[in-house]
Amino acid sequence: MADAPSSDIISENQGRVSPGRRGPAWRVRVLAAVLAGLLITGCSSDGETGPLPGISRAEAERDVEDGRALLRSTVTVRFDRGFELAESRVPLASHFELDIPLATGGSHRALVASAEQREGDPRAIVLRVDEVVPAGATLRVAKRAFQQGAEGEIEATIEGDLDPVMALLASTALQVWDPDFFDPPTVAAVTDTDRDAASQRALLEAHLDQRQASGAIREAALERFDTIPAEVVTSPKLRAALAALTGTFAEPAIDAFLTGQNCTGAPAARIAFEVPPGDSELVARVTYTASGARVVSINPFAEGERFEHLMPILAHEAVHCDQRDSLAEEIAATAFDGFLYLNLVVVDPSLAEARTRVARELNVDAIALINSGARFPESIGVLQSAGVEAVLPGTTVGYRSFAEFILAAYPQVDVGTSPPESVAVRYAETLARGSGTDAGDPFDLRYLDELLGRAMEAWVLAEAIRAFELAPAG
């Protein structure tokens, strides 16, 4: 999940030509033919040479249908010349097999489901394999496919865009092996430090140092902490959490709360630790004053949490503005706060060790996010990954995806979709720019699923998996 973290870990985001000597064209062709012959001889098991084609390239591509990655690959085998297949009583596919390297070491043998010559291309055979084939797999082709009675095999190493670790993540759910992880959480005790402005400012500085934030981001974050109106954001810990969003993709939440740059046209009236109206068990809730300004109520049981655990909560609540909540909006807001949290965990893995109420909720959501992803199951996402039947394996939770899991937490929301919220759109735009993805509607779950999968850096995911001490289920 790894290079050392840098200041752009959670930032807004973030042909090779080989010189060579030219010779006559005929000389190049002759040299290529000689090399191909040597390779064939070197790879065959009996040293036999003959009018057999050599493999010039074998490339695996994971199959995708209707925007969903499958547990199936297509391997295109390109030969160095045209060929004729020998007459055979067995299917062409039986002449091919693969050795698949395993992320845990060793390898296993895989058969080919089907094989056929590619139409219009006399040098290629297309194989279908009913599993994800990673780069580094070995392809073996029986010589008798081209010459009756021939013994031995031609071998080639398969190229591809997934290594064995990614192939494992693309096909297997990960499980928490800490027996205490899902135990009932504790309530973090509130201390004088939690309510002391100087102490919280010092903690904010330490967080920015740990993030290796640039000088500009550090200065902006501290200035925001010093200037956030205490009559609006009443707790210095909440001021630290809000200011710490500076330099992250969730930075738009700051102005959305503190200025009129939101759908209400007014700053938030209050952001405070107080019981959320209507549901004393909610972590946080947005309500409205008579004039339409937002009030963000953070449950008092969260006051003793580390302010880093409150950053995702504020990023989430900033999404809610227009009073038209929907299930898609809740899934998107929770997915964005989970994306932020995974990056925070990489900065400070001790966040994943907390077992307090807010920390536990964030930790569980993070595991569900890791075990989801229809388009990129080796990354993160919100929709069901192929091959994953339980998003929290090892528990009695039967939900198959992050989206299903979050839906169950909002039985009071009965609207499926709602218009995009401007803050969510800005979050998505930032992540899209950083990952080279087109802009889209963050409340379109298929788009959101692909966006998050592309935006999550592989090394960040690897470090988060290590922080949560995850291992393949079963």
Image (cartoon, rainbow, N blue to C red):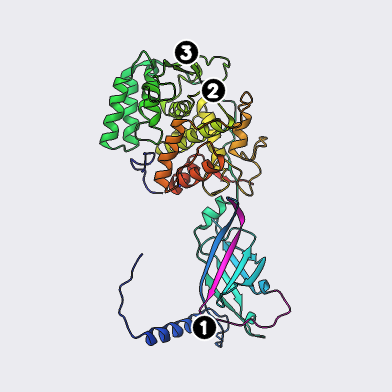
Question: Crowding at label 1, few (<14), some or many (≥20) Cα neighbours within 10 Å?
Answer: some
Of marks 3 and 1, which one's residue comes earlier in the chain?
1
Mark 1: secondary structure: helix
Q: Quadrant of residue 314?
A: top left
- Numbered tag placed on residue 127 in the rendering: none
Q: Is residue 346 visible?
A: no
- Disc number at residue 289? 3
Q: Is residue 194 magenta?
A: no
Region rendered in magenta: 68-91
Answer above or below: position of 188 versus 57: above
- Tell which of 11 and 324 is nearer to you: 324
Q: Which residue is mark 2?
A: 186
* Disc 2 from disc 3: Cα separation: 32 Å
Q: Name the amino acid type tagged 1.
A: Thr
Q: Name the residue carrying label 1.
A: 41
Label 3 CA crowd tier, 10 Å (few <14, some 14–19, many 20+): few
**What percent of the width, then of the height, locates residue 272?**
44, 16
230 vs 441, nearest the viewer = 441
Q: Nearer the viewer, residue 216 or 206?
A: 216
> Quarter-wise, where is residue 26 in the image?
bottom left
Decide if residue 356 is on the left or right side of residue 389: left
